[in-house]
Amino acid sequence: MKGYRCSLFILFLFYSSGLFAQKHMQTEILGNTESVTKQNNVLVIKTKEAEARVWVYSPTIIRVNISKVHGTDSSFAVIQKASKSLDYKETAKEIVVNTSALKLRISKSPLRFNFYTADGKALSNDDPRFGVNWQGTRVVNYRKLFADEKFIGLGEKTGDLNRRGSSYVNWNSDVPDHNPKSDPLYETFPFFVGLHSGLTYGLFFDNTHKSYFDFGATTDDTMSWFGADAGDMNYYFFGAQSVAQIIEDYTWLTGRMEMPPLWSLGYQQCRWSYTSAAEVLSVAENFRKDKIPVDVMYCDIDYMDHYKIFTWNKETFPDPKEMIDKLKAMNFHLVTIVDPGIKVEPGYKQYDEGVAKNYFATYPNGEKFVGSVWPGRCHFPDFTRDAVRKWWGASFTALTQPGVEGFWNDMNEPAAWGQDIPWMVKFGNYYMPEIRNAYGMQMARATYEGTKKILGNKRPFVLTRAAYSGTQRYSAVWTGDNSAYDAHMLLGCRMVNSLGITGMSLVGVDIGGFTGDPTPALMVRWNSLGVYTPMFRNHASKGTIYREPWRWGKENEAIIKKDIEQRYRLLPYIYSSYYQSHKTGMPVSRTLAINYTQDTTIFDTKYQNQFLFGDALMVAPVESTKFTEDVYLPKGEWYRLSTDKRYEGDKVVKAQAPLTDLPVFVKAGAIIPMQNVIQSTNEKGDGILEINVWYGKEANNFIYYEDDGSSYDYQKGVYYKRQISFDPAKNAISLSPAEGSFLSKYNKIKLTLHGFKAGIRSVKVNGNALSITDDAVTFENDNKLIRIDF
Ligand code: MIG
């Protein structure tokens, strides 16, 4: 007892003398300006703590970088350069950077960054007290919160459409069994849009370290803040005055998707796993036998030999080419999975090559890092290096030679059993904490660039689970391991829409839910939503019941089939919507916050899952246990797609929602090109483009786009594009002359009028009277101007 007291006393002495004392965390707040200089197109402002740089990228985009160390300036996300000009004025107290759209008022002491519209309305300001500050390497920006400020974005995140009051972490992780609140998930998109006072702005925090966003969750509603474990306070501020314009600017900065292969927009059937070539083929045959349209089959990890990437299991997949040839003969495309982990096994090609060339992640002393995942002990390719990406990309010949056309990148957070890779593991010049959030994106990039090269002029389809801003340039994404229950289905809609805000248009969720077994009703309902999901893939985990359309009884199969047929009927519209994504970044699946930003009802948690699918359709997701649903119709006029019944907007309607008829509404004035039912996108169809127009009081137009659906020739002008216009004032519908050198696969046009005044018996097509039957009229698809007077 005595000794114990004595040593306690000694300990106390040591502690109070400072010998044992811990050095406490300090907070360093960005302070007073010491110098201001302009170096070419960059404004450089120095304080005691750091150096701030300001660039103008466009009239609506200004970049701010505040840093303690100035190294090389690089980004995985950004593909544009700053503009050459920089217009600013300096006074004793402030520096004002002006563009035609924005005013950045920088107060000098202390150094704070405040963004205004050109006419002086506050968009977003630093918190005057705390601004940017550091705690060790951690850097944070505290910003003032407006009373009515809402936030949308951040990509693949759980929670509500309006992120106000929530906080999030970006740290790409494998999260099976995540729930509608889990965070972080697999992907990092540090970009959000702020909405207040009738104004809009966007902010992209381009920093790949573990990052944090707090939209007023923990600050007594006084501040929002974002920051990272290390790296620069490096952000792009977007000041355009509409969400659509901000998305256009963000995707200008970080890139847009290329046209996807048309087949990837058809129905996709996947499972972990179809375990033999025979099983893959029998599933495929069943689709054709039951006449359910489909384009894609998948092979999940079990096609490989002991999960060794770029190999095939010789027993279960003895002749991959023969299998794929058979699939092709049935108009299928095959997608196979690849994981980043390369099995440690001398004699295995990828292992030997990677070791010989030093392509794997290492500890600081050069020893290769080993993590355990499906193949057992693995090394991980360093996708940050060009040579490694080229090597990885070239390895795909093992898959492309037998005929694989789609490449599914999984486990690239990167995931290893136990998850956290030691911080000192190096990927090229980056230690793990800095590169983790971009690793999956670099793998997708390697896969995309490699397979694009191998396939020549053919478009590869790449799908990735982990991602960082800019991934839309290389790949589609899906939202990982969701679960078979209603709340997850609704969450999926929000996630897809949120990914759309951050530039990812080709996005899907596992239809039916990956984990657990859906009830037949949930499967049917979810499938009907899949029709209106940018990527339509049925996928399920090992150990769950089989999910193919015929596993749910005859009646349900018939509903599922009809819905998949609807997807195929809509493909001309969907493909044109992807053209819009390709050109402007506008996602195919759109939260109502894009078009109805100032309408507060759309943020109500009751209606937040509703979304626009392309320009014309509004989808109201409904749980599988409900057969009527309150649907909010924003201002304007709407029609129920299935009945053509007309509704006044700006109100809530009780919509019938049987499993056979998901509530989908059409905007008045909408123009939707469709086609007859085909069994796969390889089929030519009947050659009739079915243009549907729903009457509205306002004029409208639609850009119709078509190309071969599989090559890059569209980049050389081999496409077919025309503007379809509806003008109620002139009682006319017109198709502008076709642009581009591609010949449309539709030689006839069938125009169907919905909701037009009763009794129209004929229309004039370029002056010739044609009679209308069942509200429709069919005529030749002439590539010259076509004018229809009704
Ligand atoms: O540890 O490849 O999210 O879609 O089926 C699980 C097997 C690995 C996770 C993916 C899932 C895929 C599964 N993979």
Image: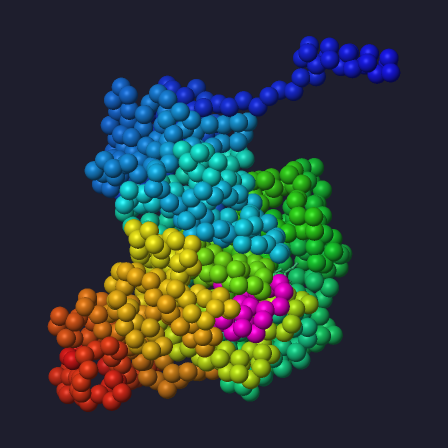
Q: Position of residue 8 (x, y in %)?
A: 78, 15
Residue located at (47% from left, 43% from top): 166
Residue located at (12% from left, 72% from top): 730
**Stretch of the chain drawn in magenta:** 508-528
Q: Observer-nearest residue: 274 or 305?
A: 274
Q: Observer-nearest residue: 348 or 302?
A: 302
Q: Position of residue 211 (x, y in %)?
A: 51, 40
In this view of the protein, can residue 646 be seen by the observer? Answer: yes
**Residue 261 sits inside the magenta stretch:** no
**Residue 509 sits inside the magenta stretch:** yes
706 horizontally vs 381: left or right? left
Quadrant of the snapshot with the N terminus: top right
Residue located at (16% from left, 80% from top): 790
Seen in the picture, residue 474 relative to 319 is either above or below; the reply is above
Q: Position of residue 717 (x, y in %)?
A: 32, 68
Task: Say which quarter of the image contains residue 14.
Answer: top right
Residue located at (67% from left, 51% from top): 416
Ligand 1, seen in the image, is in the quarter at bottom right
Seen in the picture, residue 39 relative to 608 is either above or below; the reply is above
616 horizontally vs 406: left or right? left
Task: Say which quarter of the image contains residue 100.
Answer: top left
* Colour setup of the view: rainbow
Seen in the picture, residue 55 relative to 565 is either above or below; the reply is above
In this view of the protein, can residue 85 be seen by the observer? Answer: no
Q: Position of residue 702 (x, y in %)?
A: 27, 68
368 horizontally vs 623: left or right? right
